[in-house]
Image: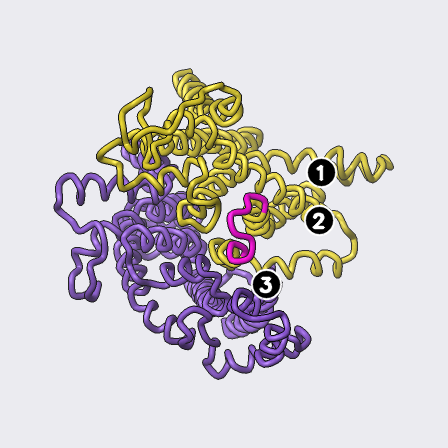
Amino acid sequence: MRTYAGQRAVLAVVQLGVLSVLVFVLTALLPGDAADMRFTETLTPDQVSRLRAELGLDQPLVSRFVDWFGDVVRGDLGTSLISGGPVVDIVKSSVGATLVLTLATLAVVVPLAVALGIVMGTRENGRLDRAITSVTLALSAIPDFVIAVLLVAVFSLKLGWLPATWIGGSLLASPVLLVLPVAVLLGRTVCLLSRQVRAGTITALHAEYVVQARRLGVPRRRLLLRHVLPNAAVPGVQELARTGDTLLGGVLVVEAIFAIPGFATALVDGVETRDVPVVQGLTLVLAVAALLLNLAADLLCNRLVPRTELLR
Amino acid sequence: MNRRLGGWLSVGIGVGLVGVPVVVAVFGPLVPVRVEAGLPYASAGVLGTDGLGRDVLQLLLVGGRTALGMAIGAVVIAYLIGGLIGLVAASTRHRWLDEGLIRPLDVLLPLPSLLVISVVAVGWRASALAITLAVALVNVPTVTRLVRAAALDAASSPVVEALRMQRASWINIHLGYVGRSVLGPVAADLGTRITLAVFLVASVNFLGLGLSPTAPDWAVSISRNREGLLLQPWSVLAPALLLVSFTLGFNLLADRLLHHTRRRPVEATR
C-alpha cells in the first residue's frame, strides 16, 4: 500500500511538472504575444519592441519559463491584460461558484448513480434493468446544452417556477438557483457512472468468492454491502475521475447558460478577449485540480481493492 | 428468436437515426434552397426564420458539414496518429521504444479536453481546422492506449506463435493478423468516440469558443436562437433534433456492437 501510494505520488509530481511546461509552451506558441495584443493600434513598432523587452518577451523561451514557473510557485499567476489586476484575484473570485456547483452536483450524482447501478446490476437483464438502461442510454445521447435550453424554456420561461439566470448574490444563500444547473449536470454523469457501477456489480456477483459466500449463507444485504459494493465501486470511482472531464465540460456550458460567474465564465471571457495570462492561469489551476482528482481516485481504488496495479 | 429480432430492430433504428442527420449533412449543401433573409423569428417558410431572419431549413441543410464533419474528421485524425503509435508500441521488441511512446501520453490523459481547446481557441479563433486538430489531439492518448492494448492481446496469442513458427513474414503477422484483430475493439470504440467528439465540438461551438456566432452550424444555431425558443421553436428544436438523432443512433449501434464482441468469446468457450 505504502509503495503504491509512493509510486503514484511520484507519478503525480512528474505529471505536474510536465503539465506546467505544457501549459506554458501551449500559450507561448499562440500567435501574437501580450505586447502585440495590447498596443499595435496605438504604438509604433519601435515602441512595441521596447515594451516587449520590458515585459521580458524577448528572452529565450527557457528563461521565460523559469521566471514564470518561479512566480507560479510563489502564487503569482501574472496580471490580466484586460483588467490589469492580478490573475490570482480572478481565480479567487470565480472559484467559489464553480466549487459550489460541482460539489452540489456530486452530492446528488454519487448516491444516485451507485443506487441505480446496484439496482440494475443485481437484476441483470431483468425488466427494471432494461428499462433503466434504455433511459440512461437515451439520456446520455442528449448534449447537456440541449437539455439546459429545453429546461430553461419549460421551467423558467413557460412556467416561471425557477430562475433562468443568476441574479446576483451567493449561490448558497439561494439554493433555488442551483436546481436547474444541477439538474442539467445530473443527466449525463449519472448515466455514465451508473453504467460503470452496474458493470462492476455484475462482475463482482459472478466472482467465485461471492458465489462461495452465498453458498456459505452470508445474508444478501451483507453480501451486497461488504463484498460486492467495494469491488463494484472501483470502476465507478475510476469513471468518476474520468467523468471529471465530462463534468467540467458540463459546468462550462451550465455556467455560460445560467450566467453563473464561475471559473468557466472567466475562462470563456478570457478566450474571447484573448487575455492570455488569464487563460494560462485558469488552465493551470483547473488542470492541477484534474490531476489531483485522478490521484485521489487512484489512491481510493487502491484502498478499496488493494490489488490495483500502477504500472500495467 | 425473439431476442434476435429485437437486436435487428434496434440496429435498424440506430441506422435510421444516424442516417437522417448524415444525409442532411452530406447532401444538404447541394439542395438549391435560396431564401432571402426576412424578419427574425417569423414563421415564413417550412421551419420559419431564426434570430437573424434567415431561413431555418436552409441553415439546417448547410450546417451539418461542420457539426458532424469536424467531429468525424477529428476522430479519423486521432486514429491515424494514435493507431500508428499504438501499433508500433505494441509490436516493437524494444522496451524503451514502447515506454517512450506510451509514458508521455499518460501525462496528457487527465488533461480536461475543453481546456486544451480553449487555449487553442485563444490563438486560432473561429478556425474549423484548429478546433478539429485540437479535438483530435485530445483523443490521441486514449486511442493509443486502446489500440496498443488490443494489439498486445493479439500479438501474444498462440496464433501469432504458430505463424512465427511457420516463418510467416512480419507484414503477414502484424498487418494481416494483429491489425485485423484490433479492428473489433476499434469498431466498438468508434461509436462512443464519435458521439463524444460530436458532443465536444458542439459544446465548443455552443460556448462561442469555436466557429463564429453567425456560422450556420447546428450547435451555433441552438446557442444563437435559444432566446427565441418560445417565439419560433423550430430554430432551436430542428438542429437539436438532428444532433440528438445522430448521437442517439450511434449510441444504439455501439451498444449492439459491444454486445456482439463481448458475447462471442463466451459462447465459444462453452
Residue A32 shows which numbered tag? 3
Give the Cα separation between the discs numbered 1 and 3.
46 Å
Which residue does the numbered mark 2 point to in the structure image? B90
Amino acid type, callout 3: Gly
Task: Kindly check if marks 1 and 2 are in contact, taking CB atoms under 8 A apart as contact.
Answer: yes
The reply to the same-chain question for discs 1 and 2 is yes
Numbered circles on residues, count = 3
Taking the magenta stretch, the answer to whether it contains residue A256 is no
SS for callout 3: loop
Q: Colour of chain B?
A: yellow
Q: Which residues are magenta?
A: B120-129
Tag 2, which chain? B
Q: Colour of chain A?
A: purple
Residue B178 shows which numbered tag? 1
Taking the magenta stretch, the answer to whether it contains residue B126 is yes
SS for callout 2: helix
